[in-house]
Amino acid sequence: MLYVTIHLTIRLNVKCVFEGDGILGINNTLKALADPIRREILNYLKKGRMSAGEIAEKFPVTGASISRHLSVLKDADLIRDTREGKFIFYELNASVLEEIMLWISDLKGDGDND
């Protein structure tokens, strides 16, 4: 379990990020996180970058399905891709996850009155 201490200045910065991106950015991120396969892909990627083929080997679904899941994660900016020759490698974009965690923590409240 991860515990995060949030300072007021950080929370204000996160609010600005979400105001700039609008609700659509939050919706895309939450939509991407809603699917169990996409959450599992993120769990694999937290261990390090992987190719699309390596990711596809982990799941009992078609390569096209994994490609779609990767596209949704990429559109939500939760992952990044890098082409190396004929391979595409994916890695976690932890900064977006950190922003979401701070936003959710802010919703929960920590006893401060803003």
Image (cartoon, helix red, strand yellow):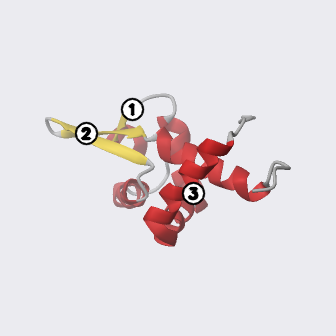
Relative side of 2 to 83, left or right: right
Q: Amino acid at mark 2?
A: Thr
The residue positioned farthest toward the top in the image shown: 47
- Residue pictured at 41% horizontal, 52% vertical: 77
- Residue pictured at 43% horizontal, 58% vertical: 76
* Quadrant (top left/top right/bottom left/bottom right) for the N terminus: top right
User: Badges 1 and 2: C-beta atoms under 8 Å apart?
Assistant: yes
Question: Residue 69, how many percent across, how many down?
Answer: 43, 58
Number of numbered discs = 3
State the residue position of label 2: 82
Q: Amino acid at mark 3?
A: Lys
Q: Which mark is residue 15?
A: 3
Question: Residue 34, how many percent across, how many down?
Answer: 60, 62
Provide the secondary structure element on which disc 2 rests. Answer: strand
Q: Is residue 41 visible?
A: no
Q: Amino acid at mark 1?
A: Arg
Mark 2 Cα-neighbour bin, 10 Å: few <14, some 14–19, many ≥20: few
User: Badges 1 and 3: C-beta atoms under 8 Å apart?
Assistant: no
